[in-house]
Amino acid sequence: MVATPHRTSATHPRFLIATSMLALFAVNAYVCRPLFGVEITKQTGSIEAAFISFSRWLADHADWQWCPMWVNGTPVRQVYNPGLVLLIAELSRLVHWTPPHAYHFLTAVVYCLGPVTLFWLCYRATHRLGFAVMAGIFYSLLSPSTLLFAAFRADVGGWLRAKRFQTLVVYGEGPHLTALMLLPLLIWLLDEAACTRKWPFLLTAPVALAALVLTNWTGTTGLSFALGAYCLSKLGAETGGSRPVHWPTLVGIAAAAYLLAAPWIPPSLIRSAQASTATMDVAMPLGSRILSVLALGLAAAGLHFWFSSRRTNSWVRFFIYFACISWVVVAGRMWFGLALVPIGTRFHLEMEMALAGVLAYAVLNLAKRLPRGSQAAALGLVAVACVAQVRHYRHYAQSISQPIDFPTTVEYKMAHWFAANMNSRRVFAPGTVSYWMNLYSDVPQFFGCCDQSVRNIELPIAAYLIYAGENGETATTWLKAFGVAAVGVAATGSSQLGQPFLYPRKFEGVLPEAWHDGQSVVYWVPGETGSLAHVVNRSVIVSRPPHDGLDVGPLLPLVAALGHSGRPAELRWLNSHEAEITAQTRSGDIVFVQETYDPAWHATESGRELKIAPDALGLMTIEPEREGPHAIRMRYTHSLEDVLARIAQILGVLLLIVWVLWSRRLKNQPRGIGAGHP
């Protein structure tokens, strides 16, 4: 392939460009039309329920500091990337839609915009309208992952089915698709900013980069693939007819973007997100990882020399590099079990976007070699195939996005029982019930969502034992230690995730039954109080973390003491980040609070600061200064890291303003004699 000369924007009228974009949007809107107005689909096992529930919570609460409803309490910024869920919350509040309606409407729009943004990148990068339209069509109506991988083909049910739509609806990858929709726009903005250094792009590129990162971690990893491909495509850019990149500008944009996003993604969150995703896949041995990186490096070097010798256009290089990187990640996991990144199979979406660009280039170059009559015939065949595929996609989309009579499901029934009976007492909701239940109430959960929220290593250990252990008494010990007042067991086959409990009958005869509906049961976890605060002797506080879920020895003295000290304590939430504890202590006592410890929590009594420390379970202990009655005020404030992150954001805004003003000043500065010489 040879370099393609850039055409002026006058070559294609704006009307034709706008019409192409509207047509791509309309085709995708026709495919996913039911999604625009649906409340809840039959895909009740989708993780989208967690995003919807979190959006409902954000819409109902103004103090976005501490979220007590999931993982025994966690900072709001820790729960999930805020980009899409905040949009859902604001849309549902402004338009008076339910959160499920707002979520499905927004994700349907995102689905339709994905091919449009890919079109925009392709056209702005090459000024070839045919290439941009073809890439948008391929991305809209073809799923290469079903052609390349038998597992995806079996999962979606055929060669030519809409894998991207299935991923959105069945698996609930709305945030991932949102990030992917933003990716082409971001690459275009980065290219304009790093190559032209014009102030509008210097201003918008960091903002767009921060917005993408704040939308989804998986999409951010996919962005790293695209950025790697972009950088590789610009090496030796002069041999591909491309504008050279000003690399310091590219680095500056990345730094400014992080500063802008810092309050939502401080270093501690990045570390916990990396740690949690690493546990979700089989880690590669270090030697295999090094060999894989070396092999990828050699392959990239070989492609670079081949591209340079053929003077291949840099944007062709970009799409080929992007396709190769994402394909290697997906194929490495699917075919060879190599986890180059955690859950590598999820990046088939990035692979499909990249392959749409590669296929568009290949098809157009092939078409050029055909006689004019053959070109017309081929175009007609493509049009017929597109019409048939649109109808095929539409039929499949309707079949998997049908609404459901949600009140008949166990998710609805158990969630409403918890909402009606548990008030502020913590529950262990099973499987998909945990995703849906906080759509209806603020009842706090032992887990809920999401994996990146978990910073306390004891929590997944306890959850695994509760789900997989055979002994109901051992599981009950863990439930009591974390302040759970009721545990639900859903009927086998009640959702698409099936029964999360390996031994669902293990609580029979161990815990009293509170509610049942068929095979779905809720059990009471006995305790004298439903409070998350307790007065206990400091000798029973867990000082050694258990080795595993079966090692409940360190927990037994604490569990035996809970509610049996004769000195009850009561915790009352004043709002989402403030609570009041009333208690009566004696010498040697300590106040034990079954809420996740965080250094930003502070406890005061009569204006004096009390010491808060974590126990070995990651929960809180408060040291009273004296014996007798206490009225302790707990408040979650900003940690030192939060303060530094906010300062970094302000610094980022100021630096961005100075950068833009300086850039405009240089542009407007008259060039004198000898200007341009070093």
Image (cartoon, rainbow, N blue to C red):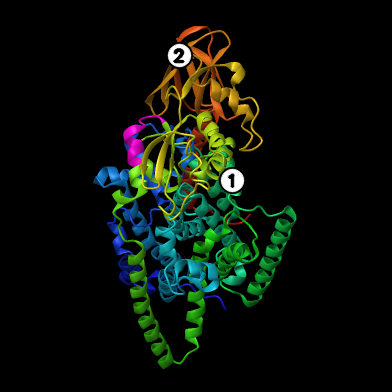
Q: Residue at x 55, y 60 (%)?
A: 345
Asked if residue 424 lies in the magenta stretch, the reply is yes
**Residue occupying the point 33% across, 44% down:** 413
The outermost residue toward the front is 509
Residue denoted by label 2: 583
- The amino acid type, in three-letter code, at marker 1 is Gln
Name of the residue lying farthest toward the right: 287
In the foreground, 132 or 545: 545
Residue 498: horizontal and vertical position, in percent?
Answer: 46, 53
Which stretch did the figure color magenta?
415-425
Q: Is residue 582 visible?
A: yes
What amino acid does circle 2 point to?
Ala
The residue labelled by disc 1 is 274
For label 2, count other residues whose C-alpha is less than 10 Å away and answer few (under 14), some (14-19) or many (20+). many
> Which secondary structure, mark 1?
helix
**Residue 582 location in percent, x, y?**
43, 15
**626 shown above or below 380:** above
Magenta stretch holds residue 609: no
Q: Is the C-beta separation of discs 2 and 1 under 8 Å?
A: no
Quarter of the image holding residue 36?
Answer: bottom left
Secondary element at image label 2: strand
Measured in 3D between alpha carbons, the distance from the residue under mark 2 to the one under mark 1, in whole angstroms, is: 39 Å
Residue 602's disc number: none
Quarter of the rendering occupied by the N terminus: bottom right
- As rendered, which of 665 and 249 lies closer to the eye? 249
- What residue is at 64 percent from the left and 31 percent from the top? 545
Quadrant of the rendering where the C terminus is positioned = bottom right
**Helix, strand or loop for the magenta stretch, by majority:** helix
116 to 464, vertically: above or below? below
603 w.r.t. 438: above or below? above
State the residue at coordinates (52%, 36%): 648
The earlier-in-sequence mark between 2 and 1 is 1
